[in-house]
């Protein structure tokens, strides 16, 4: 049985002080939940503040970053390295989010370098893949997903791949209020599992956790999570309200 993961992608919201306030409210509201891995991914500048207040006795609440460079250090103005994220207590990092790919021109090759670097620094990548509406309507979803998964995982060894969390985020569902139906989400996640099975082994495909992301809200999380293949959610907008994020964490299957 794969353990569920609910990750909140705070994007470019909340000052450092607001982030601590939001985090403490969330932590308080999900106190009794111990069978879900909860990952909060604030902006870089809020990580230090959260690392100070995070309850070290809570083994299932993790800090994550939203991006990183693949090098440990260097002349890369404006970038943050995996060493710096580890130093702040991060255990996860979102990689290849569609906003990075579309707005900041991240390529599959860059994403793959980041995945290698994250793994070698003991950071678990939350590796995002997803198609545009145009590609879905042109019946090209399968082809795009296959190429993004294959490129993102290029040369990743078998013994490392299961610490990756995959996230299927159809671009047409992100921030639009338009959620993929549980059927569409589960079907594409099944496809991702099959691609991983073909690249590695059936056993690895069975073990790897694959999330759905795109307008996940308190009102649709239960039906999404009722699908066996969906192991959790990557939540944007709804993670900025403590009540709604806590309700998503408390999904029922
Ligand atoms: P959303 O964002 O929940 O606001 O659609 C999801 C994401 O971008 O990870």
Image (spheres, rainbow, N blue to C red):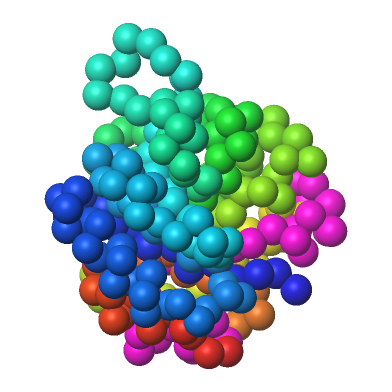
Q: Is residue 157 visible?
A: yes
How many marks overall? Answer: 0
Residue 224 in view, yes or no: no
Residue displayed at 69% across by 30% down: 155
Compared with residue 243, is residue 207 higher up or lower down, i.e. above or below?
Answer: above
Q: Is residue 71 above or below residue 100?
A: above
Residue at image position (60%, 83%) is: 227
Given residues 29 and 8, the one toward you in this image is 29
Counting from the top left corner in percent of width and height, residue 56 is at 50, 56
Location of the N terminus by quadrant is bottom right
Residue 221 in magenta stretch: yes
Q: Is residue 179 within the magenta segment?
A: no
Q: Position of residue 72 (x, y in %)?
A: 47, 19
Name the image quarter holding residue 103. top left
Magenta-colored span: 198-226
Depth check, front residue: 63 or 128: 63
- The residue lying toward the viewer, choosing from 134 and 157, is 157
Nearer the observer, 36 or 27: 27
Rendered residue at 29%/81% (across/down): 243
Q: Position of residue 96 (x, y in %)?
A: 43, 43
Residue lying farthest to the top in this orientation: 75
From this view, report whether residue 229 is shown above or below residue 147: below
In x, y percent, where is residue 129?
A: 48, 52
Quadrant placement of the C terminus: bottom right
Rendering quarter of residue 235: bottom left
Relative to 104, 107 lies left or right = right
Decide if residue 2 is on the left or right side of residue 40.
Answer: right
Residue at screen point 79% across, 55% down? 204
């Amino acid at each position: 049985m794969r353990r569920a993961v609910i990750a909140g992608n705070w994007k470019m919201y909340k000052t450092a002080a607001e982030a601590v306030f939001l985090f403490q409210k969330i932590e308080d509201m999900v106190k009794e939940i111990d069978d879900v891995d909860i990952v909060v991914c604030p902006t870089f500048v809020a990580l230090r503040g959260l690392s100070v207040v995070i309850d070290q006795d809570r083994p299932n609440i993790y800090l994550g970053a939203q991006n990183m460079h693949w090098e440990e250090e260097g002349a890369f103005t404006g970038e943050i390295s995996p060493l710096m994220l580890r130093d702040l207590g991060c255990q996860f990092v979102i990689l290849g989010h569609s906003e990075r790919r579309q707005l900041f021109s991240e390529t599959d090759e860059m994403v793959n370098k980041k995945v290698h670097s994250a793994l070698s620094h003991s950071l678990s990548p939350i590796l995002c893949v997803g198609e545009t509406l145009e590609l879905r309507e042109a019946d090209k979803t399968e082809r795009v997903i296959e190429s993004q998964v294959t490129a993102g995982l290029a040369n990743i060894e078998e013994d490392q791949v299961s610490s990756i969390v995959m996230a299927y985020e159809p671009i047409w569902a992100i921030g639009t209020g338009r959620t993929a139906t549980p059927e569409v989400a589960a079907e594409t996640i099944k496809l991702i599992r099959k691609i991983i099975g073909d690249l590695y082994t059936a056993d690895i495909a069975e073990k790897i956790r694959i999330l759905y992301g795109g307008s996940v809200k308190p009102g649709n999380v239960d039906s999404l999570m009722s699908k066996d293949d969906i192991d959790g959610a990557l939540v944007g907008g709804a993670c900025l309200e403590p009540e709604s994020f806590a309700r998503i964490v408390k999904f029922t299957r």
